[in-house]
Image (cartoon, rainbow, N blue to C red):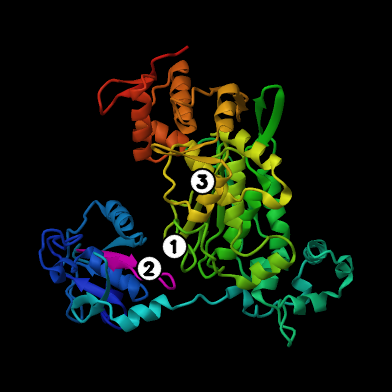
Amino acid sequence: MNKFTIQQLQQMRESEDRVEFKAGEGGNISYDGRGKTNPKDRRRCILGYVIALCNEGGGRLVIGMHDNYPHRVTGTRQSQDAIGQLESDIYRDTTIRPEIYELYDEEKHRVLVIEVPSRPIGKVFKFEDVPLMRVGEELKPMSDAMYLKILQESEPDFSEKICEGLSLEDLDEEAIRVMKQGYAQRWNKPEFVSTPTLQVLHDFALMNKDGQLTNAALILLGKSEAIRKHLYCNRVTVEYRLYHSMIEYTARQEFQEPLVLMVDSVWNYINQPASNPLQHYNDGFRIGDIPTFNRDVVREAILNACCHRVMYIQSDVVIKQYPDQLIITNAGGFPVGVDVDNILTVNSMPRCKLITEVLQKAGFIEKSGQGVDKMFYHCLMDGKCLPDYSLTDEWQVCLRLPGEIKYPAFMLYARELQNARPANNKLNVFDLLALFRASQGDSQRYTDEVTLRKLIDEGLLISAQDGYKLSDRYYEIVKKTTVNVTGQKDDTINVQLLDINKLTERQTVIYNSIKEGVQLNVQLNTTDLSNKLSIGFKTMQRELKVIENLGLIVRVGSKKTGHWEVINKG
């Protein structure tokens, strides 16, 4: 949003311009209505107005100006010297990202402006579980008709719209060739490569009957200069950093080319030997290699980000690469109906449906909505942490892809199972998730009954007193296997797998991280371990308590400043 002057604000009408004025001379506007017993009074607070304005399509809350027109400046001490904290608190409590700034009139009276963005399509925000709207001076529950109308909204397909001024000369010949080749291989039709380009463009709905090309044609096949001219924000930026704490990047590369070519260009940049080293593991006399970042996982993540992003928001797809992790963000939040809990099970509707359909025809993706399945599957098969979407909010999808092998024994067990099964009866991602949960001692409450019954009938899951455990074969692998993982700095971490009757594999990884820290004279507390291993803080507390009760670790120092050490350092 553009920043307004005090003079511009004074001429605004509250209802017409979606603005709410509050005097707040003493900085006395309640943040969340706490302390007020009447719900009607509680919702008339900063959070209530921010939520209502967001539901209305965005607007601004102005504190320090009288609500009578023309709006006289009263001045306010609201959130003085704490604007950043107010922004953080609003985002924490609502996931709405406001922009807050101060204005001063000629007499140095201070005005606080909270710019509120529009809600995403199909999304309603609530205060104390009530969707709010402004009605005169009141904040009231949203009417059923308006609430239903919002929930039934669907996002228009940006990719099927005509790109005015785009011509055949703006399309990349190599991109067209790759698209034809992909279709020919996918459907075993080698003759398709010689099909006239105009016919292919019409058949794929990239060109209409009047010869006009769509945005999908530009994004999938457009030359770099055409993309810069017609859709400058259609870009993928990769930044490499040596450490997560680094602010400045070590290397940076921007990609603005046809998507059918760009996905490989981005992968090739990420897949350099120095930034995507092999991790070596051994199982007895057999030695294997696993790249830190898996090609199929990274390609799926890039394609998902490009197909699901909101093109109306002028923001790149950004990939932050670290030695142990990729963080991929795209504008727009999850599509309607998708959230962190159902992302593996819901049939998602891509924002750029036409692009997704063409990518499917050309063999770049298996089927719309299956890319996440593939990412989870490969992470499980490689013994890595699962893809993490927990930092996603309503305006941005954030995907964290792990690189390090964290669960080597499960990796070897899963691969042995799959190699022994016929091609038409491989374990799927939901089967592997259930087995992984059992290996970590986690509950199976998220496992569906069909999957659970199948694994029990095959003897892969065995009911135990405190849940489910894996078959004896898994525990045999754990007891006999030592895995060496060669990391980014060519230092070898010896992961000694302990007695499974005492520790789960996750607990073993935690134990060895503490042991390694002691050897390197690094003191690790619970927060350090949680961040290092990408394990939730409460889960880490629970796991540390189990290991401590087994007499394997001890807490040294106070509860606030103490750290963990192993008792048996041998």
Q: Earlier in the sequence, mark 2 or mark 1?
A: 2
Give the mark toward the camera: 2 or 1: 1
Say which residue label 2 marks.
117
Give the distance between the C-alpha atoms of the residues marked 3 and 1, in whole angstroms. 31 Å
User: Dot 2, crowdedness within 10 Å: few (<14), some or many (≥20)?
Assistant: many
Say which residue label 1 marks.
395
Across and down, in percent, residue 514 comes to 43, 23
Give the distance between the C-alpha atoms of the residues marked 2 and 1, in whole angstroms. 10 Å
Say which residue label 3 marks.
434
Side of 174 where 433 appears, left or right: left
Q: Is residue 126 magenta?
A: yes
Q: Which residues are magenta?
A: 110-127
Give the distance between the C-alpha atoms of the residues marked 2 and 3, in whole angstroms. 40 Å
> How many numbered marks appear?
3
Q: Is residue 382 above or below residue 34?
A: above
Q: Earlier in the sequence, mark 3 or mark 1?
A: 1
